[in-house]
Amino acid sequence: MASTHSDVLAKIPDAYEAALKSGDLLYFPSTIEKHNELDIDFEITLCPALQKKQALPAPDFEVEATAADVRKDSTGKVDPFAPPYTSKLYVADLKDELSGEEFAVLLNKYSIVPQHFLLVTKEFRSQASPLLPSELVQTYLLLVAARRAGKHFFAFYNCGDNSGASQPHKHIQFLPTESSLGPPLEGLARRAQLEIAGRPFALPQLPYASHTFRFPTHMDSFGAEQLEKELSDAFLALLDLSISTVRHDPTYPPGRPSYNVIITLEHMHIIPRKYETYLLEKSGERLPVNALGFAGMLLVKSEQELEAVKAETVAKILRGVGLESVHEQQVEGTSRELQTML
Ligand code: AMP
């Protein structure tokens, strides 16, 4: 039976503790180093235990593989986000009021931040596909329920081959933050003074393309239809800009464009992506970057990697896996379009 969003949020802490205790969820301890750049207080998480992660999942996957062959894709790989779910990782089902579409809420099996959870589609949908209205609404309602419960979460979606995603079944992720201010990027977005409300904008401090939309105040009290329209319009406007950004780059890899989506109660951000990893000059290692890097939360596996990131600068890394901002040309294009319409 479908739960309410508040039920989901209420269940997360106990479900997390139970899954940790049973061994179905693995926790990787880490430390956080603050690093200020680009007017953002970046948090670089150092998690040495991740170096061993590759070896850890193998037995679990075997258990899951024998549980149900329907969970294997065409290449024989198990889809962990298809039912039947690992019972201790399963939290609840959700049903979208307008479309009737169904979702499951699962705990992230490999936890660096406790209570990190996922919203997955019941039916298989591709992680390379854009977010649908129902997915945006369910995401936002979970964020609203979290705030009502006195918790602070934000959501992110890694879309496409070069976005940092590791699972092909559509999943939106939710991460708690200690501060009510949200992820580090949010401070910069909040400080932006907008001349016109209701239009996407760029954060001029950032040396890469990043498209942001500020939601209307009190969007948490909108009815289902109004909320769906607001979220879908915002998403499409940002996606259009991201695709236009990609089109300005003649060396962009062929195929569907990749991008990261970050959603808070106040903003939606889409960051178009060109590459999945960045080659660190000092260590010679490839650093994977997903939406969290752009939210202001990079992840490293060793002190050596941490030093290499700082030597390289976060600005250079994010610019390296993102695209050049063409915001000025996009604004000029829009005002020219408006002039011809008037
Ligand atoms: P991404 O790497 O962006 O595609 O996100 C995949 C997320 O799913 C990561 O947070 C993983 O830790 C998590 N994950 C991977 N396998 C499982 C699983 N079997 N059950 C639950 N979460 C998983």
Image: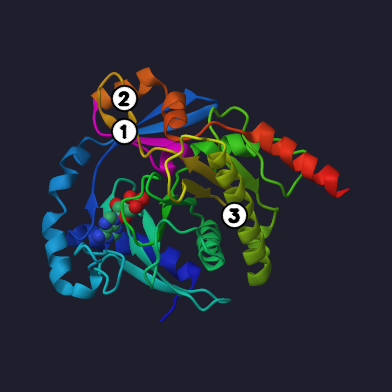
Measure the C-alpha gap from mark 3 to mark 2.
32 Å
Vertical placement of 67 versus 30: above or below? Answer: below
Residue carrying label 1:
287
Q: Which amino acid type corresponds to the residue marked 3 in the rendered image?
A: Phe
Measure the C-alpha gap from mark 1 to mark 2.
7 Å
Q: Which amino acid type corresponds to the residue marked 2 in the rendered image?
A: Leu
- Residues at marks 1 and 3 touching, judged by CB atoms closer than 8 Å: no
| Image x and y of residue 84, in percent | 26, 74
- Residues at marks 1 and 2 touching, judged by CB atoms closer than 8 Å: yes
Q: Which amino acid type corresponds to the residue marked 1 in the rendered image?
A: Leu
Residue carrying label 2:
280
Which type of secondary structure does the marked residue at label 3 adopt? Answer: helix
Name the one closer to the observer, 46 or 100: 100
State yes or no: residue 237 in magenta: no
Q: Is residue 48 left or right of residue 264?
A: left
Name the one closer to the observer, 128 or 38: 128
Q: Is residue 63 left or right of residue 122?
A: left
Span highlighted in magenta in the image: 287-303
| Image x and y of residue 280, in percent | 31, 24
Name the one closer to the observer, 48 or 149: 48
Query: In the rendered image, is residue 251 in sight?
Result: yes
| Image x and y of residue 20, in percent | 23, 57
Residue carrying label 3:
235
